[in-house]
Image (cartoon, rainbow, N blue to C red):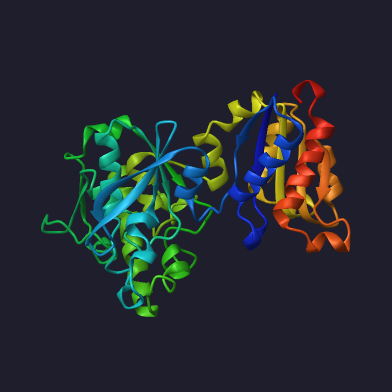
Amino acid sequence: MNILLAPCGLGSSMKADKMSEHMRQGIKMTRKNVDIRDYPLLSYRNPLGQVLAFGGMTKSLKTLDPLGRDIIAKYGLVNNKVIISLKEASGLTRLAEEEKNPLQTSTLGSGLMVMDGLNKGHRKFYIFTTGSATNDGGIGFLSALGFKFLDTKGEKVELNAKGLYDIRKIDMDGVDPRVYESEFIVVSNYTNSFSGVRGIAYEYGPIKGANPLMIQRMDRGLRNFALEIERHLGIDIEKYRGSGAGGGTGGGIIAFLDARVLSYVDAFIEITELDNLIKDTDLVIVGCKELAEVPKAHQGMLAICELAQKNHVPIAGIFANLEDGYQDFYSRGFKGIYSMYNSPSDKGLDTGYLIEKLTSSISHLLIPESDK
């Protein structure tokens, strides 16, 4: 029998991977002859941690930080797919408070990570855009792949937000041919526009260290870049969802690399080939801090429940709290919904012990005796 453990964790009190460990222990208390697969759902802000939680690995390489300084950064590998998080090389956490200036920062270091992946034979790249320190529209990233962005004199512009306004010509003759053999996916949960008052510069510029005058300048640069993209490629990047992600890097990758856009949850479902995994699963056990009505539920858990229900796989869940509306989940394939705290005395017990106890009960009720 195959069991998939897909907890979301209990907020700050217990991470998803630790909750999965306790679930595994609970099953082993009563059932030995089962194949347990861990699929813990971590925060969308930690894609490389999620890679490791799903049994993938990370690779380290020398690249550049947002200000062009040498650093060591990592990217992930799962099922021969490359997972690049912009915040690894081009992230805000790479800078001291006084160094934050999105007019000067670049995604060049993240593009160099793609080149490393290409050199190692990989051809599918997922670009996670959360946490960047940049507003360069992705021209740094794209320059690493051989794209050239030129001014009126035919000279290369600065590979940052300041350079966007100077772009008048785009030279694609020197692009590494392996780029066109590859597939790129922009991963973002955000839907901000590329430019304008609802664009990425106005929305996230202050977080990255920009004052109002800088924001206006950044936005003018993005708008100019959008016009040049339309002039050179015939693509109105302003119309694309996710184009503003990562300081406009999403837009650059969509326009020049023909990238798709996926949410964090959908990306990892695709990366891990979860839909195929579910088909070979006999029971899914989920767990979250609370279960309430469907619109308030964890999006990752909902996606897994949808796949399980589609494939007629029963679901059970362990939750710290049950709120009004949780009963609706019985119509979504749940065979059991369990609260960790059924009496006041339970709140004094060790959380890990409670999870193991409940999972043991689930395995006793829902796993056949033949797998004991």
Q: Position of residue 74 (x, y in %)?
A: 34, 49
Instruction: Judge by depth and name the residue closer to the eye, 240 or 104.
Output: 104
Task: Name which quarter of the figure residue 157 lies in.
Answer: bottom left
Q: Outermost residue toward the right?
A: 343
Q: Split into 4 quadrants, where in the image is the C terminus? A: top right
Q: Is residue 264 visible?
A: yes
Q: Outermost residue toward the top?
A: 370
Count of all numbered marks drawn on residues in the image: 0
Q: Is residue 338 left or right of residue 209?
A: right
Q: Is residue 139 visible?
A: no
Residue drawn 86% across the image and 62% down it: 345
Task: Name which quarter of the figure residue 146 lies in.
Answer: top left
Q: Position of residue 276 (x, y in %)?
A: 59, 26
Q: Is residue 141 above or below residue 268?
A: below
Instruction: Judge by depth and name the residue closer to the eye, 231 or 29.
Output: 29
Q: Position of residue 119 (x, y in %)?
A: 24, 35
Q: Is residue 348 above or below residue 274?
A: below
Q: Position of residue 316 (x, y in %)?
A: 77, 39
Q: Split into 4 quadrants, where in the image is the N terminus? A: top right
Q: Is residue 208 left or right of residue 177?
A: right
Q: Is residue 177 left or right of residue 235?
A: left
Residue drawn 64% across the image and 57% down it: 14
Q: Is residue 201 left or right of residue 19?
A: left
Instruction: Judge by depth and name the residue closer to the eye, 122 or 107.
Output: 122
